[in-house]
Image: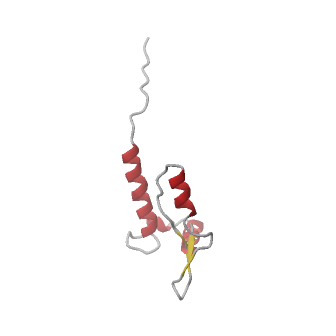
Amino acid sequence: MSYLIAPGSGERIDVFGHGGGKSTAEAMGLAFLGELAIDPDVRIGGDTGKPVSLLDAKNPHAAPFRALAERIEQRCKEEAKEGPKITVED
């Protein structure tokens, strides 16, 4: 969660500054997966056991989380490496 969309005006407010996560990821040679808005509905969904990520994919509260999950899945596929082999013999 990195920014807030102001109710009424829709203005983006960078509560914690802007670009720090991306520049840190780049400096560390890591993929930057994105930003999420601070959203009261996310807290409400979590508190009530109804996470926004389970809402319809086109729901404006669910869409950013689904997009992030897709980016994570893609990065996992890109970075997939064969793990160690373990052999057990008598």
- Say whether residue 14 is left or right of residue 55: right
Display colour scheme: secondary structure
How many circles with numbers are drawn on the protein?
0
Quadrant holding the C terminus: top left
Nearer to us in this view, 15 or 84:
15
Residue 33, position in %: x, y?
A: 46, 58
Residue 56, position in %: x, y?
A: 39, 70
Of all residues, the one furthest to the bottom in this rendering is: 8
Q: Is residue 38 above or below residue 86?
A: below
Q: Is residue 13 above or below residue 68?
A: below
Residue 39, position in %: x, y?
A: 55, 73
Of all residues, the one furthest to the right in this rendering is: 16
Residue 79, position in %: x, y?
A: 40, 44
The quadrant where residue 57 appears: bottom left
Q: Residue at x 47, y 73 (%)?
A: 61
Of all residues, the one furthest to the top in this rendering is: 90
The quadrant where residue 54 appears: bottom left
Q: Residue at x 54, y 65 (%)?
A: 19
Nearer to us in this view, 73 or 22:
22
Quadrant holding the N terminus: bottom right
Q: Residue at x 42, y 63 (%)?
A: 66
Q: Residue at x 44, y 24 (%)?
A: 86
Q: Is residue 46 above or below residue 31?
A: below
